[in-house]
Image: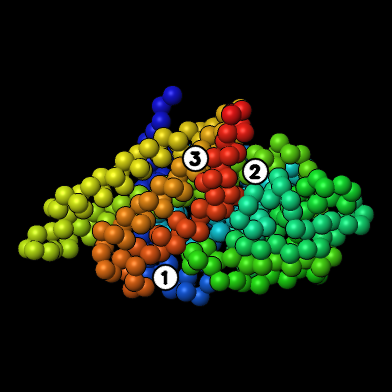
Amino acid sequence: MYFAFDEDQEEFRASLRRLLTERAPITRVREIAERRSHDAETWQLLASNMGVPGLHVAEEFGGGGFSFLETAIVAQELGRALTPVPMIATTGAIEAILRLGTDVQRRELLPALLDGRAIGTLALSGAKDTLVGSATVRAAGDPAAPLLTGRVEYVPFGHVADLLVVPALVPTGDNVALYVVDAGAAGVTATAQPSLDLTRPLATVDLAGAPARFLGADRAAIGRVVNVLRTLLANEALGAAEAALDMAVEYAKQRVQFNRPIGSFQAVKHKCADMAISIDAAQATVMYASMCAGEDNDEFPRIAVMAKAQASECLTFCASQNIQVHGGIGFTWEADPHLYFRRAKAVEPVLGNNAHHTRLLADLVGI
């Protein structure tokens, strides 16, 4: 198996990187992040002009018909630039509709999400993997026209989303199903909340008898949605880790101490080398997970868990080392390294922290 992107994919990456460098530099990221908002202009450009939310979606539903690797490239580049756009949130909603929705629901709901007319989000409840665990929302009423009641916290881009995919307990029993909720419907209140990661705003969503549409309760399909999210988060973390390394190396070349660039000191060289080794190790796992996501093979559940755990650990390490290379200014508000460290600490617990993923992997392989 050849673990590399082809020439066309690398050209796509270069084009996307140029666009983000020009349209969403770190100064703009800071400006938008401090408002706890999202970069609507850049998102419209990415969604409507480049079709990034639906690159791997079949053309019959309005997608690009490309492989999952193109979507992985987008996640990596957005992670590298820390662009505050709802790419992974919207892709999570799209994946849920693709995997569990009917053909009618797909044709009704997907076009607006794919071309940027609507923002979607997969409303996770808290930091744990509650799509297949205990949900905090319950469905009631007629199964054909269910009403959802409860609270969902830590919803990425929840206050700007137009469509929510919510995990909820079905009216009878304790099974979890996914439901689609219109963010503008009666009984839906989304409130922006402080977020450690300023580039990924969060919201609390309260549902008080909110009308919803049933998507499905198939555990295997829901598990697939969760693992796609894990894979996208892993790609995003990998891109951010690479940016942290580049930032550290560039600073080490410029910062002079004792009449020498600090990059000439062995201790600094070791830090940068350790970051590069960590990234190289994570790249193979993340790449394989992305390939498995496209093929939907039997190894995907295991490798997706491994990729999320390894990439988030890699980002935490690289972000902290980047701060160390920057010395006394590394953690200050005026310097940029803390933005990557915030992303690292915020992504760690999403869908379960590394300890959770280690236990989950042990269960999957039968240890």
Q: How is the image coloured?
A: rainbow
- Residue 160: horizontal and vertical position, in percent? 62, 67
- In 3D space, how far apart are the residues under numbered discs 3 and 2 (Cα atoms)? 15 Å
Q: Give left or right: position of 14 versus 142.
A: left
Q: Quick one: SS at disc 2?
A: helix
Q: Quickly name the residue at label 2.
A: 225
- Residue 147: horizontal and vertical position, in percent? 85, 60
The amino acid beneath tag 1 is: Arg
Tell me if mark 2 has few (under 14), some (14-19) or many (20+) residues whose alpha carbon lies within 10 angstroms of its own.
many
Q: Earlier in the sequence, mark 3 or mark 2?
A: 2
Q: Image height check: is 320 above or below 287?
A: below
At x 73%, y 71%, the residue is 189
Q: Give left or right: position of 207 versus 2.
A: right
- In 3D space, how far apart are the residues under numbered discs 2 and 1 (Cα atoms)? 31 Å
Q: Quadrant of the C terminus?
A: top right
Q: Quickly name the residue at label 1.
A: 30
At x 31%, y 66%, the residue is 330
Tag 3 and tag 2, C-beta contact below 8 Å: no
Q: Quick one: SS at disc 3?
A: helix
Q: Quickly name the residue at label 3.
A: 307
- Residue 194: horizontal and vertical position, in percent? 56, 71
* Residue 243 visible at all: no
Q: Earlier in the sequence, mark 3 or mark 1?
A: 1
Q: In the image, which is nearer the foreground, mark 3 or mark 2? A: 3
Q: Quadrant of the N terminus?
A: top left
Tag 2 and tag 1, C-beta contact below 8 Å: no
At x 44%, y 62%, the residue is 342
Q: Give left or right: position of 263 versus 277.
A: left
